Amino acid sequence: MDYSQFLMMPQELGLLVVFLLVFLFDTFMPKKSLGALPVFTSVIFGAFTIANYFMLTRGTAFSGMFESTASTFVMKAILNIGMLIVLVQSIKWSNSEFQAVRRGEYYELLLTTLFGMYLMI
């Protein structure tokens, strides 16, 4: 296996970077600054969504098991816009007193679910 095949997956790798940033923010920031996690996640994911439009690659990798075409790019863009809407809509709910403990888990689960959707496409 050649590791250069992972370069055919810039959208997936970018989403993993967003996930890692959110995970590290949730894990290592002080408790009093965790209220900014929903906004941080929304801004980082919004920047990723905009940058995603410049990551169009075409081709196959992993012996044809991964294929990147214009149609897969459009489907991933639609998923990104939907996820961005969910993130922005959930900011107020996530900052409620009831969700204060599970705030990071919610965003991390959303991002890993989106990653799974990417791979299913």
Image: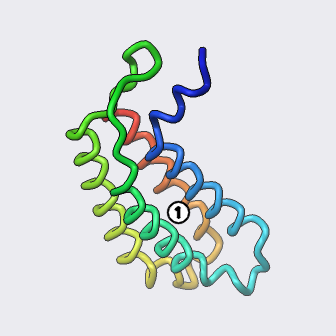
Q: Quadrant of residue 57?
A: top left
Locate the N terminus and report the quarter of the image it occupies.
Answer: top right
Query: SS class of the residue under badge 1?
Result: helix
In-image side of 115 versus 31 (left or right) = left
**Color scheme of the displayed model:** rainbow
Residue nearest the viewer, comparing 120 with 43 = 43
Q: Quadrant of residue 8?
A: top left
The residue under the point 50% across, 77% down is 94
Q: Is residue 100 above or below residue 81?
A: below
In-image side of 2 versus 25 (left or right) = left
Where residue 49 appears, as percent x and y from the top left, is 39, 62
Residue nearest the viewer, comparing 99 with 17 = 17
Where residue 96 appears, as percent x and y from the top left, is 52, 84
Residue on which disc 1 sits: 107
The residue under the point 57% across, 84% down is 97
Where residue 36 appears, as percent x and y from the top left, is 60, 83
The residue under the point 52% across, 51% down is 14
Q: Is residue 65 above or below residue 95?
A: above
In-image side of 85 versus 70 (left or right) = right
Q: Quadrant of residue 25?
A: bottom right
The residue under the point 24% across, 46% down is 75
Locate the C terminus and report the quarter of the image it occupies.
Answer: top left
Report the amino acid beneath label 1: Tyr
Residue nearest the viewer, comparing 89 with 65 = 65
